[in-house]
Image: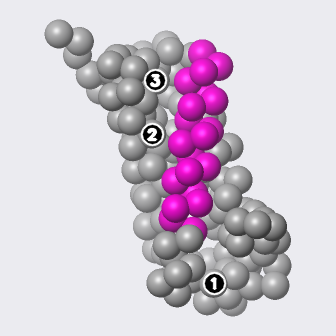
Amino acid sequence: MTRVPWGYVAALAASAFLFNWPWELAVIPAYREVGGWDWMDAFPHCTTATVGDALVALGVYGVGALASGRVEGGSKRRWKVYLTAAVLGAAAALALEWRALATERWSYSDLMPIVPGLRVGLLPFVQLPLLTPLSFWAAGRWGKRG
């Protein structure tokens, strides 16, 4: 029986949080409801969103482990792991944005570029496909040291 690499899983959660938190803070002006907030108002909301981003990264890892039948697969630094993380990150980003926009959880300011055809903001659409594979890579490097 293969054991779950808990050190890698913890490193993945931590790296996903560390990469996504500054992104969440940086894109505040692109959202209508929060664009005028100061940093202290935005801090708890961005932190909550970042926890969600880290959970997406862990979910991508879980889906990959189930699909491959190998729990250690995400820790292997291979191009197909990163590509899968990017594709699943893009799917998660689309689903989250479509749901949030449909339920009016948030809306975009004039500063948000919109992806034609998808009707979602460019910044949230590229966030998870970029930062989820980066988190996998960082967790793999971190795991090699530990």
Where's the N terminus, which quadrant? top left
Q: Which residue matches tag 2?
A: 60
Q: Which residues are magenta?
A: 78-97
| Mark 1 neighbour density, 10 Å: few (under 14) some (14–19) many (20 or more) | some
In the rendering, at what x and y percent does residue 68 appear?
39, 20
> Could you tell me which residue is drawn at 50 percent across and 49 percent down?
17
Q: Magenta region, mostly helix, strand or loop?
A: helix
Who comes first in sequence, dot 2 or dot 1?
A: 2
- Occupied quadrant, residue 12: top left
Spatial separation of the CA atoms under disc 3 and disc 1: 34 Å
In the rendering, at what x and y percent does residue 102 appear?
52, 81
Q: Is residue 38 left or right of residue 1?
A: right
Task: Report the number of discs.
Answer: 3
In the rendering, at what x and y percent does residue 57 appear?
47, 43
| Mark 3 neighbour density, 10 Å: few (under 14) some (14–19) many (20 or more) | many
Q: Which residue matches tag 1?
A: 107
Give the residue type that dot 2 points to: Val
Spatial separation of the CA atoms under disc 2 and disc 1: 26 Å
State whether residue 18 appears in this view.
Answer: no
Who comes first in sequence, dot 2 or dot 3?
A: 2
Work out whether 45 lies above or below 69.
Answer: below
Work out whether 68 lies above or below 49.
Answer: above
> Could you tell me which residue is drawn at 74 percent across and 85 percent down?
109
Secondary structure beneath dot 1 equals loop
Secondary structure beneath dot 2 equals helix
Q: Which residue matches tag 3?
A: 74
